[in-house]
Amino acid sequence: MNQLKMKLKTKLMVGFAIPIAALIIIASVVYGSLNSMIDSNGWVNHTHKVIASGEKILGSMVDMETGMRGYLVAGKEEFLEPYEGGQGVFKQTITTLKRTVDDNPAQVARLTKIEELEQEWQKNAAEPQIEARRSVTSGKATMDDVIAIIQEGRGKASMDAIRAKIAEFVDEEQKLIGIRNADSES
């Protein structure tokens, strides 16, 4: 009788232990899967923010170019407001974005190159053209001098290089988002 009680007690313990063990295993797997999915979704959101910031950099460059062109045509300082505002947005956005992608050296290098190209555009195109237009306003030069600088095409070449590098940056993030979405789905 004692052995029968032991067998019944053992059977009951095993009968309760197996479902509890299975429940613990299932809970662990679900917990791990949820954490993985949350992590993947976090990276997807991160990538969307990085892409938006890349587009914001391009927008700031367009603002600078538009402001400069408006000033070249009109000769009024207020037309430089988008140019000056774009400079501030560009510097702030690129600094923040470098910190955001600091885990990806290739992307940081692209941002550094974009920053160098912007400085080159400022030095070789924007500032000389603005100064030439100011010389026209003050009577020290003519519009033909401004036109000659514009026709050199330095500004266009620099802006095209900036646009290409930003597109490269965003394309890399698009590839990453594809990978991260696939990870999230799996």
Image (cartoon, helix red, strand yellow):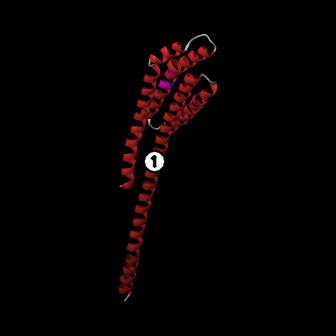
Q: From what the image shows, is residue 175 above or below residue 159?
A: below
Please give the name of the residue rendered at 53% of the width and 29% of the height, measured from the top-left corner. 66
Disc 1: which residue:
43
Depth check, front residue: 105 or 7? 105
**Number of residues whose C-alpha sits closer than 10 Å to that of mark 1, classed few (under 14), some (14–19) or many (20 or more):** some
- Residue 14 drawn at (x, y percent): 38, 76
Q: From what the image shows, is residue 82 above or below residue 124?
A: below
Please give the name of the residue rendered at 41% of the width and 77% of the height, measured from the top-left corner. 16
Q: Secondary structure at mark 1?
A: helix
Please give the name of the residue rendered at 57% of the width and 17% of the height, measured from the top-left corner. 133
Please give the name of the residue rendered at 39% of the width and 48% of the height, measured from the top-left corner. 180
Q: From what the image shows, is residue 38 above or below residue 130?
A: below
Q: Quadrant of residue 90?
A: top right
Give the residue furthest to the top: 140
User: Does 136 sit left or right of 124 as displayed?
Assistant: right
What residue range appears in magenta?
Answer: 116-120
Q: Is residue 14 magenta?
A: no
Depth check, front residue: 30 or 110? 110
Depth check, front residue: 149 or 32? 149
Give the residue furthest to the bottom: 1
Q: Quadrant of residue 168?
A: top left
- Residue 131 drawn at (x, y percent): 58, 16
- Residue 173 drawn at (x, y percent): 41, 40
